Amino acid sequence: MRTVDSSPIRVPVGPGAERWTCRTPQHRILLVVHNVTSANRLMDILPLFHDDFRIQLLATSTESSAFQGGIGELFTALGLPVLPWKQALSTPVDLAISASFGGQLPSINGKLSILSHGVGYTKKLAGSREPTFGLSPEWLLPNGEQFVDGLVLSHPEQLDRLRRVCPATVDAAVLAGDPCFDRMLAARRYRARFRRALGVRRGQRLVVINSTWNPEGLFGDQQHDVLPSLLPRLATELPADDYRVAAVLHPNIWFGHGPGQIRAWLDRAVRSGLALIDPVHHWRQAILAADAVVGDFGAVSYYASALDIPVLIAAPGDGRLDPQAPLATFVEQAPRLDPYAPLEAQLTQLITGHRPQPDSAEFITSAPGRSAPLLRRHFYSLLNLPEPPAPALLEPLPLPPFDPPTRTVPLHVYTRISGTDIVITRSTAQPYSPYDADGSTHLAVHEQTRDPSALELADVITRDGPADDARLGGAAAWAAEALHLYPHCSAAAYVSEHDVCRVHTRKHGQFLLASQPDADVDPAAGASALHAWLASGHSVPPDGLTLRLHTSGAVHAVDVTGGLARPHSAAADLPDSASVGSRQE
């Protein structure tokens, strides 16, 4: 991870900077970054200064946070001039904006406004005798004197607590809403798009696992440490076609331990279908897409509840919240995860029995949808500048990149056939016993599995990618090679599109599977259904047939055509490379 350059900059500030600049803006605004978490909130408000030629934006890092990872990359993405902290303290600015209290903020050479980077001010720091981080004399009057010119609050209840614990700073407080929440409110209408971006199919439930960064959080190990056992149970107890699971982890988890370490810890979970969500740009979209959140005492759980998403608390963080904060009340009253009870039953009860929590939305902001004009008015009043004539607006949440699950952990597939209707359940766990006497099971394995021995036992081997991938010789050549390399395998399925799969069988020829327009099922599940159909003695007529897959709470019609080509035999169709490999073996 790249660190922040400590060399002073010369343009657009610094000695002799006027010789090198093309413009000389009248006012300087300094964005003060403590860590990536606080930078998230500063990025929310950046559009409030767009198109104003009177303003030069600058950035700096206080270098006071224990979590320095990711800041360099973030500054690169922002593309603003970055002042080393020492230079920032000696450079006159008209306004500095911070979303944290870390660093020598009283020494900044200009006016200062501070925002919360969570849902108001709710947490107590470990070992602190003060009631609430950021809302007490310890932070607001470090030397017995007020140093902030603006303290942005999102709701009057925070102002009431401020009056009780630090009345000397009430005159600096301003109620200006919550820009993070406002961006989420504006994006609620795009929930279906966010779900599609995460590869959530029709009828599937998206469960988001969320953790704040404290050791008492869900990702931490200071209380019950349920996560190491919870993750594999999510993969084994939640059928692959009924659920999609994603993880939203606090940026301090990512950049404290390192993204590579997080991926290493969660490797099997990812190979079982877990989506790791970008903690800076895409966590809000994942929350908006969720059917349920399994979280802790962090702000994200509260945001989810305020958006009417069911929340199950897995780590209450006893003693880490200000008992007067609404978040503490929410955590106390929210349903709790029983780490020893069946997970699917708990999630079903949570979702079906959910009732809105109006208090959550009420206490997050007293000005829903209006933070942009309120914040801009506050900032420009400190600048002593008239606001730009255009409306104050926030940036819409971007559509995340397409991230469908790629399950490379072997899947145990249960099927039950009645006519052309096939009930199918895929899971990373072997069923304890057959569901009934009419059902059957088989093993489906992605070719990129970490366990080569599983491929030797697979009944169905799958692969996904472009249909004409030259590295594989195309779908047909790959399938022929797979059937040759793994004699136990009955079918090789190549998924080339979101709803299309080409299946090459050892005894019955080649088939094309395509979901009908109103169906939405993983083509690999269709391949397993076809394998079960053929293995039970059925065949595919010359004019094809339609299989009706019962999964994810719906019926999905999949058209099957083909089967006229000669069945696979020996290695006649293998590319030279495979034949050579066979001779060498």
Image (cartoon, rainbow, N blue to C red):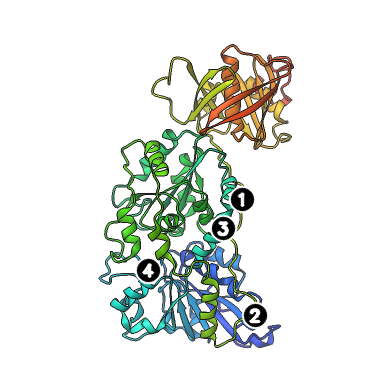
- The CA distance from mark 2 to mark 1 is 34 Å
Check disc 2 and report its element: helix, strand or loop.
loop
Is tag 1's residue or tag 4's residue first in the polypeptide sequence?
4
331 lies left or right of 486: left
Q: Give the amino acid at mark 1.
A: Pro
Is tag 3's residue or tag 1's residue first in the polypeptide sequence?
3
Q: Give the amino acid at mark 4.
A: Tyr
| Residue situated in front as seen by the camera: 414 or 408 | 414
535 above or below 479?
above
Q: Mark 1 packing: few (<14 Cα in 10 Å), some, or many (20+)?
A: few
Residue 528 in percent (x, y) is at: 57, 24
Residue 32 in percent (x, y) is at: 49, 74
From the viewer's perspective, is the residue at label 4 or at label 2 nearer? 2
Asked whether residue 134 is in view, the answer is: no
The residue at the point 43 percent across, 33 percent down is 236
Q: Mark 2 packing: few (<14 Cα in 10 Å), some, or many (20+)?
A: few
Is tag 4's residue or tag 2's residue first in the polypeptide sequence?
4
From the viewer's perspective, is the residue at label 4 or at label 3 nearer? 3
Residue extending furthest toward the top: 537
Disc marking residue 389: 2
- The CA distance from mark 3 to mark 2 is 25 Å
Q: Give the amino acid at mark 3.
A: Ala
Disc marking residue 401: 1
Q: Name the residue that disc number 4 marks.
A: 121
Q: Name the residue that disc number 3 marks.
A: 187
Q: Give the amino acid at mark 2.
A: Pro
